[in-house]
Amino acid sequence: MAFDCAAQLRAVSLRVTRPRVAVLAAVRAHPHVDTDTVIGLVRADHPAVSHQAVYDVLRALTSAGLVRRIEPAGTTARYESRVGDNHHHVVCRSCGAIADVDCAAGHAPCLTASDGHGFVADEAEVVYWGRCPDCMHSPTSEGSR
């Protein structure tokens, strides 16, 4: 995985550093991961990496298009390495789990606005809300959120 991450970094003209490889590997291994979890994952193998370094790397990877930042309403920012395909997300109202949902129709932006107000849309972001299978079968999650 480290080689693949290094190749991805080079492909977007980012210098290959241990923090960048570690952050990219963490995001690839844990889809929809929040920043605190990324910090914990990176610091498990590289204790000297600072919180600020992880934030800076996430920002650089997002700007370079290697990761995507999502922030469904009422949740913390999450990161994923599935980029460039204009997929959507479903979020569990009970536990906060997030899963990918492929576009239902065609290519990006896969939805057409009724009035684009002169904008040229190139992406549509849809968030479906509900309850995941685990929470649907859990009696303790009744009435959550």
Image: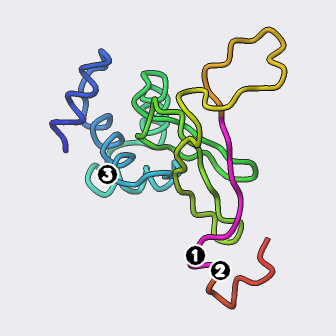
Numbered tag placed on residue 133 in the rendering:
1
Q: Position of residue 119 (x, y in %)?
A: 75, 12
- Measure the C-alpha gap from mark 1 to mark 2: 5 Å
**Mark in the foreground, 2 or 3:** 2
Magenta span includes 130: yes
Q: Residue furthest top?
A: 118
Residue drawn at 33 percent across, 53 percent down? 29
The amino acid type of the residue labelled 1 equals: Pro
How crowded is the residue under tag 2: few (<14 C-alpha within 10 Å), some, or many (20+)?
some
Label 1: state its secondary structure.
helix
Q: Which residue is mark 2?
A: 136
- Measure the C-alpha gap from mark 2 to mark 3: 39 Å
Q: Quadrant of residue 69?
A: top right
Q: Position of residue 85 (x, y in %)?
A: 47, 33
Quarter placement of the N terminus? top left
Residue drawn at 50 percent across, 35 percent down? 68
Q: Which residues are magenta?
A: 125-135
Q: Which residue is mark 3?
A: 47
Q: Are marks 1 and 2 in contact (CB under 8 Å)?
A: yes
- Above or below, 52 against 78 in this view is above
Label 2: state its secondary structure.
helix
The amino acid type of the residue labelled 3 equals: Pro
Q: Position of residue 97 (x, y in %)?
A: 58, 63
Q: Residue furthest bottom?
A: 139
Q: Quadrant of residue 109?
A: top right
